[in-house]
Image: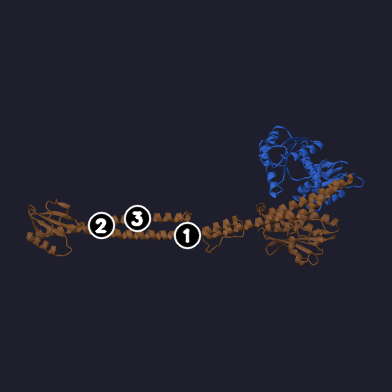
Chain colours: A brown, B blue
Amino acid sequence: MFRSSSFRLATFYALAFAFAVAVLGAVTLTTTRAALARQFDARIAAESASLAREYQAEGMIGVIQAVRERDATPGALDFGLQAHGGVSLAGRLAATGAPKGWSVLNESEGREAPERTRILTTDLPGGYRLLVGDDLGRLEAVDSVLFQRFALAFAALVLLGAAGGYGLARGVHRRIASITGTAEAIIDGDLSRRVPTRGADDDLDRLAVSFNRMLDRIGALMENLRQVSNDIAHELRTPLTRLRSRLEAGVTGTGVAEREEVLEAGLADLDAILGAFAALLRISQIEAGARRAAFRSIDLTGLARTVVEAFAPSAEDAGGSLALENEAPLVLDGDPELLTQMLVNMVENALRHAGAGAAVVVRCRRIEGAAALSVIDNGPGVPESERARLFDRFHRLEASRSTPGSGLGLALVAAVARLHGGEASLHDAGPGLEARVTLPRLAS
Amino acid sequence: MKLLLVEDDPETAAFLKRALGEAGHTVDHAATGHDGLLLAAGEPYDVIVLDRMLPQIDGLAILRTIRASKVKTPVLVLTAMGGIDDRVEGLEAGGDDYLVKPFAFAELLARVNALARRPPPQDTPTRLSVADLEMDLLKRSVTRGGERIELQPREFQLLEYLLRHAGRVVTRTMMLESVWDFHFDPKTNIVETHMSRLRAKLQRGTSAELIHTVRGAGYCLREP
């Protein structure tokens, strides 16, 4: 905690603040002190001037009278009136030989504490000397009270600052520690951990939310990776086993023609396996979402036309038909290569599973602000309970296990649809099946 | 033809060298990118077959260097990376064609042959012909023995591609890529279907077959 950056920051601020307060205090103290000293002197000077005026008006008797009156008043200044040669005429001040003007008299004899008196000495006409003074101790007492108060306030301030800083640092530290703790837990293998948020929408909360979203994304990618490794391990084992037994039979086989046949069949098997590999890799590449950079404006209808033109002759040769239902352009943002492959997979899927003489229709239209691409066949269709799972990798219907295909065609369709922010679905075309992909990124 | 093969895997290299030799080509082999670069810059080759993943230097870096030093030899890039962007990257680096490993040798051979430059044509041709088959690229018309043949736009493109590569084998994939712009392998053999329709349209009475099927490889348009 004491090594955390928040604590260091709080300490630094507390110190800087204390320094600033100390500077302010010093300036205030000196200024106050100077003002007090001026006031102190001004009072002495005023009394001195007042007595000098008394002398001019009333003469020496008046002055002596005034000094005695003042001496009798508590809290008054100290006075001294001397005749020529330092003979004291009145007043307590008996400083002889004090220079004319301001001076300080130290009286230590016969007192418990030495007393320092600031004296203003002025000459009165006729060789008299007037001394007016005040105990400097009074000034110093005010001074020390001021200083004590300030020191008290300063101590309280530093204490409060330190406590506040500590509390602040502790709060921030605790929240950062919870993020660190989550990261550590994930490093140790608990991938489901997420940073708790307080819903305060402050910077740390936003950091936590971003952190969690990043973790979700990484989790999804890891899940995808795990899925692909599983698929490769399990689903490719079957065709590889078939290939292996075929090759084994070829090794033990006798005739040259037989071996040639085995080799050719083996190559075909291998091509099918490589094809499944390529499809798997492509699906995972699409699902990683790295392809959005290749998006551009394309006409979905034009793309569908190319595919329909390419596949119609094959459909006709098989006794069926393939047609594009509409001609109006439907422009959207997307990856033309992937969308083409998606549509090809949908069309091939329909032609293959609708059976001989399948009539397949491709329809591009606008549904609720999204482009909808449908491939509709008149085949036997798919029971509703089976439809959603058909988009899973390697999932094939029992009825079509015997037909060629890797079970990856529709998985790629779903992946491309998701990449485009849309979704793939299967509907009853009564009779037959409608494979539909909605793509919301319509170009404006 | 004189070919340069830059491939680090000794087994693949030996197989390709032998097989290309059997197909009538002279093959120089470089096992490292460095040797490949030296040979490519120093000797005149008809086609360079360049593996993309080489030790030390990346194949694409070599390709860029070759292109930067004004060597215009056609380059076929081989790669184990089948990503969609990888092809674009390879072509942008100056490659003329791109083939993903593993591939059938027939596919490689056909692509190498297709890449080799013919003697420079006088002008951009406006007419292509083989035997009594003629194509006018300006009028977009095709005649056989003087008799006009009506073709669909896609069939016209297909025939044009065959005519431009007359006398050489073109594979299914090459046609899928250049005629339909399909950079993946459909399960349905659409090329075969289109080809048989094109053949039927080109057939005039007892006239000889011009489009020949090359078993295990593809098609070849040549004089009977």
CA gap between label 2 and label 1 equals: 45 Å
Specify whether disc 2 shares its chain with disc 3: yes
**In the shown orientation, is residue B155 left or right of residue A10?**
right
The quadrant in which residue B134 appears is top right
Please state which of the two labelled residues, at mark 1 or mark 3, is closer to the viewer.
1
**Rounded to the nearest whole Å, what is the CA distance between mark 2 and mark 3?**
20 Å
Mark 2 and mark 1 lie on one chain; the one further toward the N terminus is 2
To which quarter of the image does residue B122 belong? top right
Contact? badges 2 and 1 (CB < 8 Å): no
Residue position for label 3 = A22
Q: Is residue A258 above or below residue A92?
A: above
Report the mark closest to the observer, 2 or 1: 1
Residue positioned 15% across, 55% down in the render: A109
> Disc number at residue A35?
2
Locate the C terminus of chain A and report the quarter of the image it occupies: bottom right
Task: Locate residue B213, reporting x and y percent.
Answer: 85, 45
Work out which residue is located at the far top of the displayed protein and give it. B42
Q: Decide if residue B178 is on the left or right side of residue A20.
A: right
- The residue that label 1 is drawn on is A170
| Spot occupied by residue A62 in the image (x, y as percentages of width and height) | 8, 61
The disc, 1 or 3, on the residue closer to the chain's N-terminal end is 3
Q: Position of residue B138 (x, y in %)?
A: 78, 45
Q: What's the chain of the residue with tag 1?
A: A
Chain letter for the residue marked with disc 2 in the picture = A
Task: Name the amino acid type tagged 1.
Answer: Arg
**Which numbered marker is on residue A250?**
none
Q: Dot 2: what SS?
A: helix
A217 vs A339, left or right, is left
Residue A334 in view: no
Q: CA distance from mark 1 to mark 3?
A: 27 Å
